[in-house]
Image (cartoon, coloured by chain):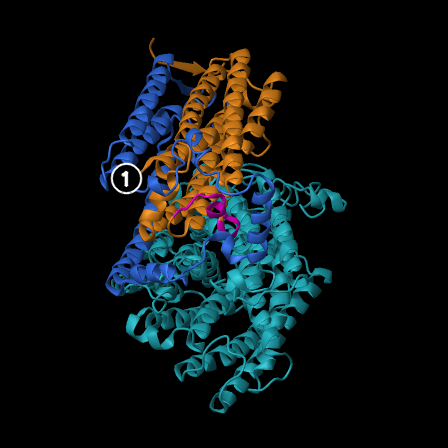
Amino acid sequence: MTTQPAVHSDHHAEEPSYLVSKRGIMSWLVTVDHKRLGIMYMVAVLFFFLFAGVLAVALRTELFTPNQDLMSAQTYNQVFTLHGAIMTFLFIIPSVPAALGNFLLPLMLGAKDVAFPRLNLLSFYVYCVASIFFIGTLINGGLDTGWTFYTPYSTSTGTAVIWATTGAFIAGFSSILTGLNFVVTVHKMRAPGMNWNRMPLFVWAIYSTAIIQVLATPVLAITLLLIIIERSLGIGIFDPAMGGDPVLFQHFFWFYSHPAVYIMILPGFGIISELITVHSRKHIFGYKAIALSSVAIAIISFLVWGHHLFVSGQSELAGVLFSFLTFAVGVPTAIKVFSWVATLYKGSIQYNTPMWYAMIFLWTFTVGGLTGLPLSTLAIDVHLHDTYFVVAHFHYVMVGGTVIAFIGGIHHWWPKMTGKLYNETAGKIGAFLVFVGFNVTFMTQFFLGHQGMPRRYYAYLPEYQSLHQVSTIGTYILALGLFWTMFYLLASLFGKSKATGNPWGGVSLEWQTQSPPIEHNFHDTPHVHGSPYDFPEIDKSAGAHAH
Amino acid sequence: MAKVFLNGQPVEHPHESHEHVSPMTTYNAVIGALFVLTALTYAVSFANLGPASLAVAMFVALIKASLVVAYFMHLKYDDRYHLFVFLGTIIFVGIFFGFTLFDLQSRNALNDEQETFVRLRDMENAGQGLKVGVENVPERKAKVLEHIEAHGGGEHGGEHGGDHGGGHKAEAKH
Amino acid sequence: MSTAHSHAPVHDDEHNPHLAHHFDTMGQQNASAKLGMWLFLATEILMFSGLFLAYFVLRMFYPEMVLEAHEYLSKTAGGINTAVLLTSSYTMALGVRSIQLGDVKKLRLYLVLTILCGCIFMVVKYFEYSAKFEHGMLPGKFYSAHLHGYEIEGLPHIFFGVYFMMTGLHGIHVAIGLAIMLWMFVRAGRGEFDKTNYVAIENTGLYWHLVDLIWIFLFPLLYLVK
């Protein structure tokens, strides 16, 4: 608990919030304020989420019947590729770190900004340039290789592969620079008294993510560069017609892309830790376990990429090793889920929108995580690889995991970021629609995959039609829920409700300053003397954790 | 004077910086060692060590790299976390190389068993092998041939061989 | 000569003109800058590692072809470049040492020497590359050396592809390094560096040493190893 009282708004009413401290569009375009950058990233990633989401709705509509409904087979290939590529590179990887991470990291650490504010601005512009390249892809022939760019198709197809790989290459640098910035910030910019054991778990999560960003993304960069060179110069490393090895490409690609999925989920884990503690007014169960398991996941994630190559021609022994290691990475993840549930136990649970999203997460992420186990079992994966089972698994962890956590986090920190409160009833309706829509869409896909429906297929046997139709209907419900959420959140910006500095009664430092914060975050440097989860109503004598 | 903090802990002497300055002798010794080791690598490359030559070359390169990192880059005298970052990176490179080469090695064994490269060579000899470079692009091949004709034509491999330290034709095969 | 320590004069950090608004002390600022640079170097190492892996895979699958093709690389040129880069690392390190002791003139001298070495590297590389181009030893589907009379058994276009990618990416990094050093030279001339503020020079040095490190491995692998 900090020594300072919650809000100073009455003493320092003259100092304006970061939103209005500097005026004019130029002040936003050249800002080095991490909060403004976080907001700009938020707008950008949510725009691409909307765009790629519409592509998904188009896909599912096409799949309503086995025959052509909306688009030709070639167009279908392009739509699922672009859905995947845009969602991966322009939405989900930057989403939590660049939007919420940028906004919250310095606040939670008690710092005035990140370690390298100008580098932060550069990261944002690099991201913008990357998105221009993706738009260029759309204009110059699209992309039909699948977001995974497998060779030799990607080195020989006529679509705009070079545009897309250049875009992803550039987006990678934005990710690297953000990660680098965050690692240095966590090491060097902590407030007085904040040692590693007193950092909020969201910070631990962002830190572990940043490590992966720094170590894994450069390998993606060289992989994409090699694709570009292979296409333009025909070197022959990946293309068998020129003497290369296509499985080598897969090793290169998945060395990044597997840790990348942990870049996607670890920040989500961090958000859930914050939501569950604050909205159940209870100290986190197993702080050290959750903190260290984030780091463990970051490290082990680099050892498991071969589980994407089980049926590609990888050696059996390598397959067995990777299968075993993949089981290992589930252990720290499960530790987290147990700790969150234990935190809820005997907590004073507030049934508000962020808590609903946290509870949805516990269900959907657990389903996603558990379905990873049959996929990591070598013998079973032989049957499930490249079926809808895999599609359902990764949507459960990415959408049911990261996106649900992201939306929950947006609600939780909405008052802090905007100074407004959204309509709570509308929030609950949105959460309900999203929950129902998501599960209807993707639970059916486990069955589809189990029955043998392959992924990325445009046409299918009539036996699969009824499940496909159920899944498509679910998509519309999910889309409705997401649009509804966007609507009431935007409406709150024009509403009159003003949020206080600490509407939820949180103890971490971001709640100890006004909403929205002033440009320099805190009027005086905060001093930290205890854990960010020591809620005032906790009875210390009842054996709560001492720090 | 207000208390100054770094990494959450109070700093004792915040306004003094204690940066280590290496003496000239250190730098001179290191550059000398680097040149000696380079000459060694160069000399050893002429001795026919067979498969050991890669290991020897990499070992010497490792020593040279360690000298550059420790003394020129000051890692020996720096914050220990920098060493952790550096070694961590090397370990992850090792993981990348290790697993990939391990998997490809097994495919190499499979190739030996299936005589893939023997069959590839037979196909090449029969004129059905994979095509080399510009052979894959007939228009460019035609342009290259035109260019050669225009600039003196025919074989000029032998004339330019000497000054490139070994640019000979098929006789240079080991 | 015994090791020296440089002590910054004891004055109020808060008014140091080089201190950025979000840092509390110069010590924090400099420590952050160096950590940031080491993390960046980590990313560069990982990026180049992909190319080194491609090289090792090539050696594994086509050992005779690699052996034959690499004979056409000029060991002399490679050797000169190695000597030049090692020297440039030496001069860069001495440049950092100079500014640690507050000698701006010497710093500028050493920066010039380092840039000079880098330029020699690029010139030698230019001659190397043009010789290759002339003889049709180009990457991938541009490879036409067999039409110029150089018969290499196997698929040498892959080897030359890897050769040009590795040395090319390295060369781009050398060029970027030269530009950065030139900028540091200009800044030093403006009096921006002194005994208390030289972390930008240190970081430039770290970048340049990395470029040297990559070459230390690249040279034996491509040019020398049988």
- Say which quarter of the image contains residue A332: bottom left
In this structure image, what is the colour of chain A? cyan
Q: Is residue A511 visible?
A: no
Q: Is residue A313 above or below residue A380?
A: above
In this structure image, what is the colour of chain C? orange
Depth order, front residue of C110/A115: C110
Residue C132 inside the magenta-drawn segment: no
Q: Position of residue C104 (x, y in %)?
A: 54, 13
Depth order, front residue of C50/C18: C50
User: Is C82 on the left-hand or right-hand side of A474?
Assistant: left
Depth order, front residue of A496/C85: C85
Callout 1 secondary element: helix
Q: Is residue A485 above or below residue C53?
A: below
Q: Amino acid at mark 1?
A: Leu
Q: Position of residue C50 (x, y in %)?
A: 41, 47
User: Is C97 on the left-hand or right-hand side of C181?
Assistant: left
- Say which quarter of the image contains residue A15: top right
**Farthest top residue in view:** C1
In this structure image, what is the colour of chain B? blue
Q: Is residue B116 above or below residue C88?
A: below
Residue C149 inside the magenta-drawn segment: yes
| Chain hosting mark 1 | B
Q: Is residue C191 above or below residue A266?
A: above
Q: Position of residue B134 (x, y in %)?
A: 51, 53
Q: Is residue A393 visible?
A: yes
Q: How many marks?
A: 1
Bounds of the magenta segment: C140-152
Q: Within 10 angstroms of label 1, few (less than 14), some, or many (20 or more) residues? A: some
Residue underneath mark 1? B54
Depth order, front residue of A254/A18: A254
Q: Position of residue C206 (x, y in %)?
A: 45, 29
